[in-house]
Amino acid sequence: MRHLMSPLDFTVEEIDKLLDLASDIEAHPDKYAHACEGKKLATLFYEPSTRTRLSHEAAMLNLGGSVLGFSSAASSSATKGETVADTIRMISCFADICAMRHPKEGAALVASEYSSIPVINAGDGGHQHPTQTLTDLMTIRSLKGRLDHMKIGLCGDLKFGRTVHSLIHALVRYPGIEFVLISPEELRLPSYMRQDVLDKNNIPYEEVVRMEDALPELDLLYMTRVQKERFFNEEDYVRMKDFYILDAQKMELAKSDMLVLHPLPRVNEIAVEVDKDPRAAYFKQVQYGVYARMALILTLLNIEV
Amino acid sequence: MVENTLSVGRISEGFVLDHIEAGKSMEIYKYLNLDKLDCCVAIIKNARSGKMGKKDIMKIECPIDFMDLDILGFIDHNITVNIIKDQKIVEKKALHLPKQICNVIRCKNPRCITSIEHGLSHIFVLTDPETETYRCKYCEEKYDGRLRSKKIKAK
């Protein structure tokens, strides 16, 4: 039995196979409409989420399965002091697969150690968010036709942004990848990511503060939100939150085929006027996320169609 | 007795741990749980050493299958472990960095699941043998090296 804790749990070949399956689902949704009939997905969300929970649930419903679960710790037995280990042993009796989001790092890994059903890590604090990475890879591959030979700008909160860290881990495995790290000094990519991941894999990268300096060369711009919940000091958050705003004027500096991705929710970092730009891919990204999660559920349940 | 020397008798079965960084022996005593053992332990602190200047030495009289050498390897793999039987050194054991250690050090990351679920073991995994980096199995927080030898931390 396999679980998904980190994007690196799958080899490049396994990711390619999963994305091929996701593309086939996109092209022939009817073929998969009953693939999970009689199967149940439990969504165990100990902290609020809109996209990730609904995307997992939509994925299972699209496959003909059903869903059950809870959407906050307050409506679970966690309030009574039940451990993750006990909860997952109980859920294993009710469902065939589960997706878990928890504010504490490593919670999903604990669940996987006690579970008799596959566990999908749907976000564990600031640590990992592998289904977002699958979504990002699916979006890039579908719209660019490749995952290699690209100059990728990562912009915003590169310090606490788990989606950025996971995406870097996943992309350094492909040839010809270059990064431009766009962030204020306070939100730079942590040194362990620069040294242990980028330097170790001989990945070329540069760090810039001004977005405008990087835009003309990029094939892809991955925007992130400055997350209020990661700051201990409100003053620092207020100073940082509007540091980058991508608007129509800045988009004029970019290549005609540069893609703009964002894990969402966005706040101010992408002006609404950019939404109608054909290069804005962040809402398509949400749709690709459903296909990627459908492919993941089928893969973890070993269902072939 | 020769001036400025201290004699500690031989042990019949057990270990002599030599080349311990000066001042570390009490921590080793603690992490090997020797306080819970009903056995004879001699700790020599700040002994003169040609190689190290000062060093600690420990003599532990206990059955030889009793010792968790993984913990010693984690604290300082440069320690020399002499295995004693019938008052003689029968083997010199090389220490290695253990692949993982369980409940020796605790994860300090307040965002880690181990910070709220107290029944969980604190497991650290060797993620990079070259830099001797250990990370929490659950949250991947790097161990700050407080327990480990200064020589190792300086790497």
Image: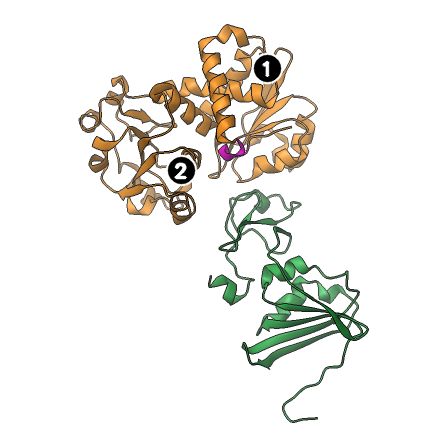
Under circle 2, the secondary element is: loop
Secondary structure type for disc 1: loop
- Chain holding disc 2: A
Q: Position of residue B42 (x, y in %)?
A: 71, 76
Region rendered in magenta: A5-10
A297, A48: nearer the viewer = A297
Mark earlier in primary sequence (2, 1): 2
Instruction: Specify the colour of chain B.
Output: green
Position of residue B34 measured from the top left corner of the image (x, y, whole percent): 72, 66
B30 versus A289 height, above or below: below
Q: Which chain is orange?
A: A
Magenta-colored stretch includes residue A9: yes
- Name the amino acid, label 1: Glu
Image quarter of residue B93: bottom right
Q: Residue at x 52, y 55 (%)?
A: B132
Q: Residue B114, how many percent across, how many down?
A: 59, 45
Q: Residue at x 24, y 21 (%)?
A: A273
- Distance Cα–Cα, label 2 vs label 1: 35 Å
Which mark is drawn over residue A161? 2
Identified at 65% across, 75% down, the residue is: B57
- Residue A124 appearing in the image: yes
Q: Quadrant of the N terminus of chain B?
A: bottom right
Report which residue position mark 1 lands on: A304
